[in-house]
Image: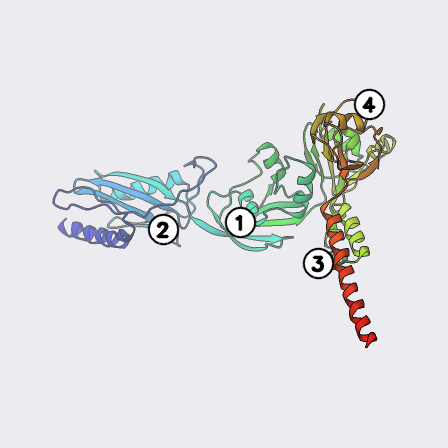
């Protein structure tokens, strides 16, 4: 028994010295036979739920806090699962935990200790979660090995890789509360041995369904591939992401989505297709964008402006007759439909005394809203109306009747651009005058 205590004492003092730099070890009083412990300070671990002992699978790198009370004293130490799946308990021996659920791991450790010390009280608790690598494959620029934690779901890995895709950026401009990283243009699957687990991030982010968002395990392969599914977002009963069926029209798709909400504005429905955004990377746009604005030609500026207006590939249906034809036409794979919300406001900007947002009223003219905004100021000029759905801007007179959600912009006479032009003209005129003066002196001689 003395030999046993000497070995345990040496083992624990060794661990004490190793951890002493972190000031995380408790003192061991051998005379009074008091308990002793030593442990590293553990970083906070963020979980989405409490770990279920009957579900969590133990793996390499997990750390347990082990406490055993015998007639000879109290032993407290940390047990780390080794690369072979074992934990080594001094004096007691080795316990293999590879592939075991947490509840079974507790029982195995306790049973091993009681084989050696029948009267021992053994307490074991998981205190630190392991990290490991999983492989990402398929149509992804992030294909390769990536580090995850044993409590990470597939969505956690996706969020760590994709901060915001270009498609996400487009959709967020048209949907105020659009959840990012739904991977609308991709299908995600977890390959686990001979099984393929479908990951439905759309349903997870829209409805909080965790059934199709599995927790990752060692040796998992996360496969990402392009898809042509149809998506419906916005003011519908059930936003959906589905495969296209034969001869499926846009009305059929809206029916599958449960129809539109009472707050929906179907007259301003808009859609785009995955292939419609490929022009974003057009060489001509990139070439012009790399030129300092003051050195661009008028043709370059005109092209860039036109390209930016149609950049996102979004299509707007504003004519009621065309809308009916559109809804009854056959859909295309990869379509994304957005049903916007009705707006009951008009915004007034620019050369008015009280710019701001005002309640929309039927059959009211632009001039009525300008009067509500305090009337014209001293710098007011032309009137424009901007459509928030299409982004178009048209010059109107004061009798024009705007639609809900429109922006009335009253141009002001003097702006920064005009003053810059005036300064340029003055500068050029001064340069020309200097040159003429020099030429006159030279010719005069």
Q: Residue furthest right?
A: 321
Which numbered tag is attached to residue 292? Answer: 3
Q: CA distance from mark 1 to mark 4?
A: 61 Å
Q: Earlier in the sequence, mark 3 or mark 1?
A: 1
Q: How many marks?
A: 4
Which numbered tag is attached to residue 66? Answer: none
Above or below, 170 relative to 323: below
Mark 3 or 1: in front is 3
Q: Position of residue 63 (x, y in %)?
A: 36, 46
Q: Is the residue marked by circle 3 packed among few (<14), some (14-19), or many (20+) residues within 10 Å?
A: few
Q: CA distance from mark 3 to mark 2?
A: 63 Å
The residue to which callout 4 is attached is 363
| Quarter of the figure with the C terminus | bottom right
Q: Earlier in the sequence, mark 3 or mark 2?
A: 2
Secondary structure at numbered mark 4: loop
Q: CA distance from mark 3 to mark 1?
A: 48 Å
The residue to which callout 2 is attached is 86
Mark 2 or 4: in front is 4
Q: Earlier in the sequence, mark 4 or mark 3?
A: 3
Q: Earlier in the sequence, mark 2 or mark 4?
A: 2
The residue to which callout 1 is attached is 220
Mark 1 or 2: in front is 1
Q: Position of residue 209 (x, y in %)?
A: 57, 33
Residue at left offset 37%, top offset 53%: 82
Viewer-proximal residue, 408 or 197?
408
């Amino acid at each position: 028994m003395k030999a046993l205590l000497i070995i345990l004492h040496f083992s624990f003092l060794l661990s004490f010295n190793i951890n002493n730099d972190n000031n995380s070890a408790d003192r061991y009083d051998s005379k009074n036979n008091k308990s002793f412990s030593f442990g590293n300070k553990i970083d906070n671990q963020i979980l989405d739920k409490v770990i279920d002992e009957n579900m969590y699978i133990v793996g390499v790198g997990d750390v347990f806090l082990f406490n055993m009370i015998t007639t000879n004293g109290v032993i407290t130490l940390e047990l780390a699962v080794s690369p072979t799946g074992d934990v080594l308990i001094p004096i007691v021996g080795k316990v293999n935990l590879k592939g075991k659920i947490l509840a079974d791991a507790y029982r195995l450790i306790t049973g091993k200790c009681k084989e050696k010390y029948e009267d021992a009280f053994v307490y074991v608790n998981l205190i630190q979660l392991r990290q490991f690598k999983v492989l990402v494959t398929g149509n992804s620029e992030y294909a390769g090995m990536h580090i995850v934690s044993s409590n990470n779901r597939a969505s956690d890995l996706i969020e760590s890789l994709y901060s915001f895709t270009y498609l996400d950026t487009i959709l967020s401009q048209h949907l105020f509360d659009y959840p990012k990283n739904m991977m609308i243009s991709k299908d995600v699957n977890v390959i686990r041995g001979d099984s393929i687990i479908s990951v439905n991030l759309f349903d997870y982010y829209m409805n909080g369904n965790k059934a199709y968002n599995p927790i990752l395990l060692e040796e998992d392969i996360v496969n990402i591939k392009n898809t042509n599914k149809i998506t419906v977002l916005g003011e519908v009963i059930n936003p959906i992401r589905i495969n296209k069926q034969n001869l499926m029209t846009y009305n059929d798709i809206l029916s599958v989505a449960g129809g539109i909400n009472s707050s929906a504005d179907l007259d301003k429905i808009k859609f785009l297709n995955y292939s419609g955004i490929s022009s974003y990377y057009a060489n001509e746009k990139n070439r012009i964008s790399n030129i300092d604005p003051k050195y661009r030609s008028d043709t370059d500026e005109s092209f860039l402006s036109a390209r930016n207006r149609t950049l996102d590939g979004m299509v707007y249906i504003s004519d009621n007759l065309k809308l009916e034809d559109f809804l009854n036409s056959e859909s295309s794979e990869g379509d994304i439909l957005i049903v916007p919300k009705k707006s009951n406001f008009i915004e007034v900007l620019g050369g008015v005394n009280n710019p701001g947002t005002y309640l929309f009223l039927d059959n009211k003219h632009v001039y009525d809203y300008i009067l509500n905004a305090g009337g014209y100021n001293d710098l007011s000029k032309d009137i424009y109306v901007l459509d928030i759905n299409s982004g178009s801007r048209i010059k109107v007179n004061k009798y024009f009747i705007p639609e809900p959600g429109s922006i009335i912009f009253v141009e002001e006479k003097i702006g920064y651009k005009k003053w810059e032009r005036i300064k340029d003209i003055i500068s050029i005129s001064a340069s020309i005058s200097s040159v003429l003066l020099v030429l006159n002196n030279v010719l005069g001689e």
